Image: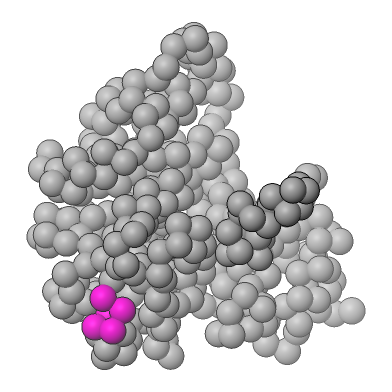
Amino acid sequence: MTRDELVRTLIPDRVRQGAAYQVPDATGMIKLDAMENPYTLPKPMRDELAHRLADCAMNRYPDPHAMAICAPLRRWMGIPDTLDLLFGNGSDEIIGLLISNLIGTGRSVCAPDPSFVMFEVLADQYAVPFRALPLDSEFDIDSDGWMDSLVEADPALIFIPQPNNPTGNLFSKDRLAKIVESTQALIVIDEAYTAFTDADYLDWAIRYPNVVVMRTLSKVGLAGSRFGMLIGHPDWIVEFDKIRLPYNINVLTQTVVQFALECAPTLEEQTGKIRQERRRLTTLLEERGFSVWPSEANFVVVDCKMHSARSLFEGLKQYQILVKCLDGSHPRLANTLRLTVGAPEESNALFGALDQLVSS
């Protein structure tokens, strides 16, 4: 049998017909496409971190539960002792872990539509049925429509980003509570952008037996460390820990996260700057005739109105600025761009380029 025949025989059609997740080359670009913190730690802190990394025991396996991180993380995020923690190699690993638990059960996964693409991507990779839950005209939860869909889909798992990506808005707390109270599915509230909003749903993991909360440190300056967490009642965490791969948080990441938690005031100062810049970015975009969707995250979605989103996307690349073109990704995101909130000088470069592009 030839290699091509072996590939077609051994690799499922759903994999061969799919495509790898694409990350554009951002070398030399002002990077406003991936919701990253534009700030690094001050040099004295980076120097201290370098010393700690140099002392890491690379010849030893890491602590399988990253226990040194738990206490400072609880203090910083206000996680009560009644809830347990499970760590993942970014939120993606946790999403995959939760979905993989459903393999062979016939139960489905649900998530808002539009929302974070990895919910559907990972469900497809694990051959678990996925059901999209369309949002209403204001990109909020469509309570009646969702209730009907959930009865039909009979999901075991429902992901609810709060705030949502890519739209940036918070869903109505009352509508979300109605969904939580109406289903026997496990509700995973994804608070990836919790640093940029005053909303906090940790107490829901105590109040409701079917709620857990997912968070990450990627958006507050540790995207390169790949560190995410699931927070929930011990009854949930002990079960999911059984299917977590051992040693999934490497010793370098554990060291970086532990050090970053010691630098929490600096991270908070940086997220405060991003919130402030989000307001300025929104104002200056609106002054230029763009429609900016309300955002509680570290990005904004821009309806380009009389301009072509695709043309602006390509034009900005000529100015060495990379943003996310949402046009074509979903019917309700037509002619939109998603802009990460950068540092003021990055925003200024963006405005300079936009002024040139829209006037030409």
Residue nearest the viewer, comparing 24 with 60:
60
Give the residue displayed 83% in from the left and 68% down from the top: 315
Report x, y in % for residue 243: 31, 41
In this rendering, would 165 be left or right of 83? right
Relative to 142, residue 193 above or below: above
Report x, y in % for residue 137: 43, 90
What kind of secondary structure does the magenta stretch mostly adopt?
helix
In this rendering, would 207 be left or right of 220? left
User: Is-magenta flag for residue 24?
Assistant: no
Q: In this rendering, does residue 355 appear at all? A: no
Report x, y in % for residue 26: 74, 49
User: Is-magenta flag for residue 153?
Assistant: yes
In this rendering, would 64 be left or right of 124? left
Residue nearest the viewer, comparing 138 with 245:
245
Q: Quadrant of the C terminus?
A: bottom right
Residue nearest the viewer, comparing 60 with 139:
60
Give the residue displayed 35% in from the left and 67% down from the top: 109
Quarter-of-image position of residue 196: bottom left
| Magenta segment | 150-154
Residue nearest the viewer, comparing 155 with 158:
155
Give the residue displayed 16% in from the left and 69% down from the top: 184
Report x, y in % for residue 219: 48, 49
Quarter-of-image position of residue 229: top left
Q: In this rendering, does residue 300 appear at all? A: yes
Give the residue displayed 65% in from the left and 60% down from the top: 16
Quarter-of-image position of residue 61: top left
